[in-house]
Image: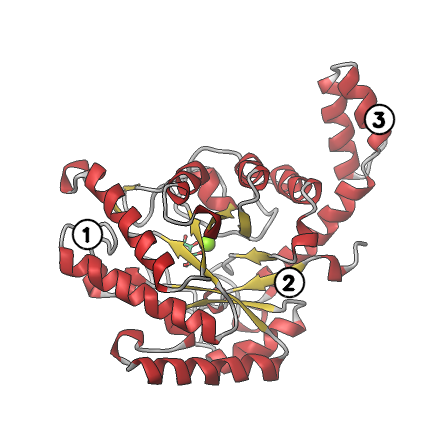
Amino acid sequence: MPQSSDYRFSFGPWNIHEGADPFGPTVRPTVAFAKKLPVYRELGFEGVQFHDDDAVPDVDQKSPEQLRSDARAMKKMLDDAGLVAEFTAPRLWEDPRGVDGGFTSNDAATRQWAIDRTKRCIDIARELNTKFVVLWLAREGTYIREAKNAIDAHKHLLDALNALLQHDKEVEIAIEPKPNEPMDHAYIPTIGHALSIGSQTVDPKRMGGLIETAHAILAGLDPSDEMAFALAAGKLWSVHLNDQNGLKYDQDKSFGAANLRMAYNQVRVLEQSGYPKTRRFIGLDVKAMRTQKAEVATRHLSNSRRIFLALVEKVRTFDSKIEKQLIEARDYEGLEMAHLAHLMGIKI
Ligand code: 3MF
Ligand code: MG
């Protein structure tokens, strides 16, 4: 097996959850944040991905001093649990003001609120000892095309990114693209869009991307190719590995649970790029099934990590001589069979 120290794993507190869905209430008791922290190390994780209000509740209401001192208290909790913060992400989508988006709202005051709130999210990150902020642009899109001027929306988004980069001269911002849900159409659906807008900012080297498996599949794209695009540009700053059974609601299934070969190819591209050497995290954005009983409602996390490490082993043990021969002969049926046989543990 690969050394588990090769890769660093992270998840967000929202990945241990009560099981509510749009059609039914919670089915498991709430686990307090402080009770989630020890679970990280137990399951082999060292990084915590935070929404701003996971780290400091009532972000908008607090004075700057209060915000920083609350964030420092959270940093102490992390230190005591032997954990580090990977990033913070502004949870704009749960605030009534963000009902029709923040950065791309038609209302100037709302756009300013989104920028101010995200500046606070950056300040929290810095107190948690990370420079890394992730933007999942949940409601930056439309339910109907005519609701916003899309050209203006992209300009507003760029203005917001510039204001954020200028607020803190060291912050590094990764956009997490997603094509739909909650909106019908999101303005930044793919990593190509994310890196393109990043390249137009005042400081492109501090703009990158986070790729989530399910989001790429919902865009009809192959997650490993999306990752390769970002990796080739040195812009894959984190991942949200999970799985997705075709074009449905965002499922956040355990990594490899729907399509093991697609999972293998994501691991393969990360291995090819030497991702562990970057010391960046492998984030798992996975949800337990609603049917899962409370006592075993963290298995989706440990199972996903285990599948990831088993696939690292598969990638590392694939016979590179056979690969080279089959590629030279352009025998892709043979190459496919060699990979499938290796994955299944059968002889060709
Ligand atoms: C939604 C997501 C989000 C983001 C998170 C961090 C709630 O589909 O994937 O999870 O990952 O907000 O950016
Ligand atoms: Mg995600």
The answer to which of marks 2 and 1 sits earlier in the sequence is: 1
Q: Are marks 2 and 1 in contact (CB under 8 Å)?
A: no
From the image, which quarter does the N terminus lie in?
A: bottom right
Residue at mark 1: 105
For label 2, the residue is 302
Residue at (27, 61) in percent of width and height: 115
- The residue depicted at 84 percent of the width and 26 percent of the height is 322
Name the colour scheme: secondary structure
Does residue 5 appear to the left or right of 69 in the view shown?
right
Q: Quadrant of residue 163?
A: bottom left
**Left or right of residue 328: residue 134:** left
Three-letter amino acid code at the position of disc 2: Ser
Q: Nearer the viewer, residue 57 or 199?
A: 199
Residue 27, position in %: x, y? Answer: 42, 69
**Which kind of residue does numbered mark 3 sit on?**
Ile
The residue under label 1 is which amino acid type? Ser
What residue occupies the far top of the structure in this picture? 329
Res 152 visible: yes
| Residue picked out by circle 3 | 322
Q: Is 174 left or right of 159, judged from the image as shown?
A: right
Residue drawn 82% across and 41% down?
317
Residue 164 vs residue 337, the one in the foreground: 164
